Image: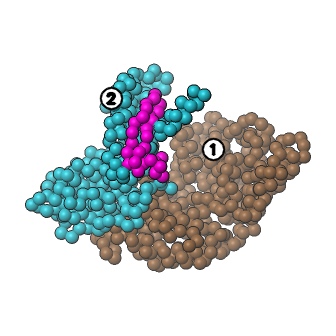
Chain colours: A cyan, B brown
Amino acid sequence: MWDYSEKVKEHFYHPKNAGAVAGANATGDVGSLSCGDALRLTLRVDPETDTILDAGFQTFGCGSAIASSSALTEIIKGMTLDEALQVSNQDIADYLDGLPPEKMHCSVMGREALQAAVADYRGETWQDDHEEGELICKCFAVDAVMIENTIRANGLKTVEQVTHYTKAGGGCSSCHEGIEEILARVLAEQGEVFDPTAPPPLPAATGLSPLQRIRRIEAAIESIRPQLQRDGGNVELVDVTDTAVYVNMTGACSGCQMAALTLNGIQQRIMEELGQFIRVQPASALQKTAAASGG
Amino acid sequence: MQPIYLDNNATTRVDDEVVEAMLPFFTEQFGNPSSMHSFGDRVGRALKQARVQVQKLLGAGHDSEIIFTSCGTESDSTAILSALRTQPERKEIITTVVEHPAVLTLCKQLEKDGYTVHYLEVDSRGRLDLAAYRELLTERVAVVSVMWANNETGTVFPVEYMAELAHAAGIPFHTDAVQAVGKMPIHLQDSKIDMLSLSGHKLHAPKGIGVLYLRRGVRYRPLLRGGHQERGRRAGTENCASIVALGKAAELAMTHMEYENTFVAAMRDRLEQGILAAVPHCFVTGDPEHRLPNTTNIAFEYIEGEAILMLLNKQGIAASSGSACTSGSLEPSHVMRAMDIPYTAAHGSTRFSLSRYNTMEEIERVVAAVPDIVARLRKLSPYWNGNGPVDEPEKAFAPTYA
């Protein structure tokens, strides 16, 4: 069963703004019937101010597709169109307290419906540039099409390179067989043979100097801090090693039952920033390590 | 509210009598059956009895034709790979498009290794094209592997007849029977089936135990080599407690066979007819005339299966779906696609699979719950307008990258 957040369940069981908006003057139809997720977004926009007065959704899709649609309409109501276009799929996912990696495409569909509706309102044609393949890397939610395109565009030859360019395979490494298969197929088309023993080229992400690395970790934490502060909490960076980042959870976050979940969220963000697997642990773990090595 | 479990094709509750039979084999009967002392001897005798119990359920000629494995998937892989190894000059395999991933994924991998795999197609009711099958039976084929009953629709395939044809052409025949064993009478000794896979947890035994039936005299190469367990045909210390459990479960399945095919079938029929009568725009998939007694698969048009399951689950009802979302894949079930069920219905296909533990009261509760759930999701659907689908649904809502 999917690990849906309470927020996702709430928006699925009690969706907001279901149905078409009366007097709508913008419609966006997006999705894929083969995938089983499709969404019609209708908006009523004030022509004077370009403000979204009302938004409604009709969705053919799973629990998280319906929840993402509901969240999208709640987020954008009252925004101007330009403000609404700034809403990213990550914003939709964050609003729902996260989505499983297999379900991130539901939030992407929400953002695209919005773009399509705005284009419809402005009399433009919306072009979808999004093509989705089979999910290969579950740690970083990277699909086959993305991997294949990146291999072609950059002439990649090894699994390590694919990891550096797309992050795919940089976590648990279970998907390396899948990445090798894509490499073998693309290289074969180019008359080359995939060589699993080829020496790894100089890695991009691990080429960071220690200071650059810490700056990136800090930037990742900064991007999450406002969310924690909204809930009355905060996070403090304590130490960084080659494989781990140690933090203190403060305010409402300290002792919160959700602390482990929050640490996971921070870990995910830092891994994305560094393109490498790293463990985020409470600073108390650092003291234990020190005590163990000292004793 | 007592939960209602209608997902018995996924797995079943272990029967209380089965648990009782297996428990001593964790504690006082902990010996290794290969050992030369009384601890081992008693366990060895229990395994022998379990082998006979499974032999009887399968109607096999000899108890030595029963090889205990870890699961249905292991049995499938062992059977198919054995046939390939014993006939290295044969490079073709015949199977069907609607097999379980245990066979299908293996076949896809074998294609990468240079084998040619023929996938028999099905019609809109899930029936195999036997004329096409006959054409493919050549001396290039190493093995035919066809499931006895389909896990999603319950459709039963004529494997005994297909085995006769394969036998006449000199080709070994394997059947993945994990859904059929225990639900319908089987008499392997009167058939030409050479190998058969079964899985304990589909018939009220625990997970982690399976069987490969291997007809006496069929050429064979083990998947796992090592000790002399299972007469050297499947090395590794026996999962004794679970083997005893499977033996007991096989015996109980024989006892309940008639109940399964009368009362369980009647509950399934009531469920199906109740839903079809109360819900517009839904239909049964597969071949109802040749079907397992416990399974119905109903496609609810214009809504998606995971959403249906979540709302059912909220009322304590457990079922399963062929939608893409429930498995995290990009396509609805390959079985629904093979029958050419349109996307708008395939994603809403919902499987209810019963067992002897269900009651008619439970079925009535499900019949009462389903119409509201479907109506509620249709209210959210862009294909639905008021009391029916929009006119020309596929044109009225044609999203950008459909």
Identify residue for label 2.
A154
Q: What residue appears at the point 65 percent right and 62 percent down from the top-left corner?
A: B13
Specify few, some or many for label 1: CA neighbours under 10 Å numbering under 14, 14-19, or 20 or more: some
SS of the residue under disc 2: helix
Judged left or right of residue A138, residue B105 is right
Seen at 64% across and 40% down, the residue is B81
- Residues in magenta? A233-260
Q: In the displayed structure, does residue B269 sit left or right of residue A251?
A: right
* Residue B308 image point, x, y percent: 45, 65
Please, what is the three-letter code of the amino acid marked with disc 1?
Answer: Ser
- Asked whether residue A71 is drawn in magenta, I would say no
Kind of residue indicated by mark 2: Asn
Do the residues at pointers 2 and 1 share their chain? no
Q: Is residue B332 left or right of residue B382?
A: right
**Nearest the eye: A45 or A213:** A213
Q: Residue B238 appears at what percent x and percent y? A: 76, 45
Q: Tell me where residue A207 appears, x and y as whole percent.
A: 37, 23
**Residue ID at (60%, 28%):** A295
Name the residue carrying label 1. Answer: B77
